Image (cartoon, rainbow, N blue to C red):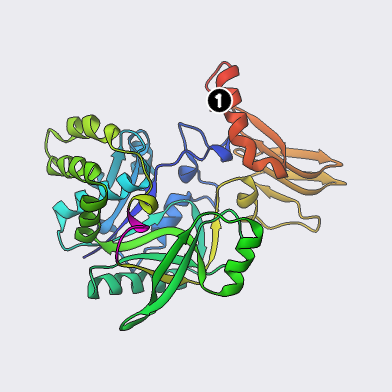
């Protein structure tokens, strides 16, 4: 059977003050009244059965996930007691799925992105499942077809086509986030895709790679999975998981595995990681002002993003390139070109301001 695990454990600090430790960005209902997590799950309709969708998230968010997605059975929410990066999150999911279905094919997906068109996404994901079901030694990643020379993403370089499977290519190299000149070369070559952080593999294959390349995590995760569904599960999870080595799946597994394939995914791929990228989901007016959840009165102003968690009038006068985010607890006003630095402001507030604002 085909399964999918959606990774939904991040806190989304750069989307403060809406995203907080109590309600992270993937659970905010700020994309047409739906959360990023709900949208990610809806992209699987008709491809993976609802009973095969698992959510790997912080244990602190498990109750919220269940409330927002009541069709999930409690066993489909895998709560991490603490974050130990993606190698352990995907290993945790794989170890549990191996107890349910040892022959499972498993997709690993993100809860941070808006991906369109959905049918193209599904065709690429289906191709990944077909490849690992035919050639189970492969680990499959997806390269988003670049639309510009982005410096904020990692890149995957494709090599020769996988024999007998022309839609997939053996991976030559994984590249870190490049400088602008290098990114231009990558895109011009036609050999590179943006590293999507999405994968498909057979559960047994990823566990074998963990055993070889990250044995400490493998041993701990298998001990946790052995107790899954028993009275000892919570104790074992709380005892073992926080002590696993913290490392990403790219560093620990993908860059070292012997059989890694990349399937191009020619979609519009928006990482909703800060307020600027969220603004791209909203229609602009004639002055490139955008409003979400509020009424924006913009006089002599351009390139303003205004978002409110409740019905609210936000007035701006004589501004250019400013972001205003309003919640009942806090209001953020910043230059839009400082969106990536909001995390620093959150740290300052946490250290210097009394009250539960972050």
**Residue at coordinates 47% horizontally, 68% vertically from top-left?**
157
In the image, taking residue 187 as reference, residue 104 lies left or right, namely left
**Residue at coordinates 12% horizontally, 43% vertically from top-left?**
226
| Residue nearest the observer in this picture, 177 or 355 | 177
In the image, taking residue 175 as reference, residue 225 lies left or right, namely left
| Residue 136 visible, this orientation | yes
**Residue at coordinates 81% horizontally, 55% vertically from top-left?**
287
Question: Residue 199 at x, y = what percent?
Answer: 36, 61
| Chain part drawn in magenta | 253-258
Q: Locate the N terminus by quadrant.
A: bottom left
Above or below residue 66? Residue 81 is: above
Per the image, the residue denoted by label 1 is 357
| Residue nearest the observer in this picture, 336 or 316 | 336
Q: Residues within 10 Å of mark 1 (few under 14, many from 20)?
A: some
Question: Residue 281 at x, y = what percent?
Answer: 61, 56
**Residue at coordinates 75% horizontally, 51% vertically from top-left?**
289
Residue 90 among those drawn in magenta:
no
């Amino acid at each position: 059977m085909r399964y999918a695990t959606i990774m939904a454990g991040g806190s989304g600090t750069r989307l403060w003050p809406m995203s907080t430790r109590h309600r992270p960005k993937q659970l905010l209902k700020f994309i047409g009244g739906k959360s990023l997590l709900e949208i990610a799950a809806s992209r699987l309709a008709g491809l993976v059965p609802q009973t095969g969708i698992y959510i790997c998230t912080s244990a602190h968010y498990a109750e919220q996930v269940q409330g927002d997605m009541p069709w999930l059975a409690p066993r489909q929410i895998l709560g991490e007691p603490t974050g130990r990066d993606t190698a352990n999150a995907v290993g945790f999911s794989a170890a549990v799925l191996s107890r349910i279905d040892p022959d499972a094919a498993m997709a690993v997906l993100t809860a941070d992105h808006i991906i369109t068109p959905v049918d193209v996404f599904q065709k690429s994901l289906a191709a990944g499942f077909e490849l690992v079901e035919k050639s189970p030694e492969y680990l499959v990643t997806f390269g988003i077809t670049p639309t510009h020379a982005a410096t904020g993403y990692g890149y995957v370089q494709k090599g020769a086509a996988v024999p007998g499977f022309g839609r997939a290519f053996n991976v030559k190299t994984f590249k870190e986030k490049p400088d602008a000149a290098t990114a231009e070369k990558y895109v011009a070559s036609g050999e590179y895709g943006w590293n999507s952080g999405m994968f498909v593999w057979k559960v047994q294959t990823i566990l074998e790679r963990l055993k070889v390349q990250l044995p400490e995590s493998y041993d701990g995760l298998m001990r946790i999975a052995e107790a899954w569904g028993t009275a000892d599960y919570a104790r074992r999870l709380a005892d073992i998981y926080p002590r696993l080595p913290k490392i990403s799946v790219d560093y620990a597994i993908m860059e070292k595995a012997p059989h890694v394939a990349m399937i191009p995914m020619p979609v519009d791929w928006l990482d909703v990681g800060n307020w600027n990228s969220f603004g791209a989901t909203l229609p602009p007016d004639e002055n490139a002002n955008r409003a979400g959840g509020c009424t924006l009165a913009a006089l002599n102003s351009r390139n303003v993003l205004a978002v409110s968690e409740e019905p609210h009038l936000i007035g701006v006068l004589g501004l250019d390139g400013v972001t205003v985010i309003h919640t009942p607890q806090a209001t953020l006003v910043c230059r839009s070109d400082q969106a990536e630095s909001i995390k620093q402001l959150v740290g300052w507030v946490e250290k210097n301001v009394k009250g539960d604002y972050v």
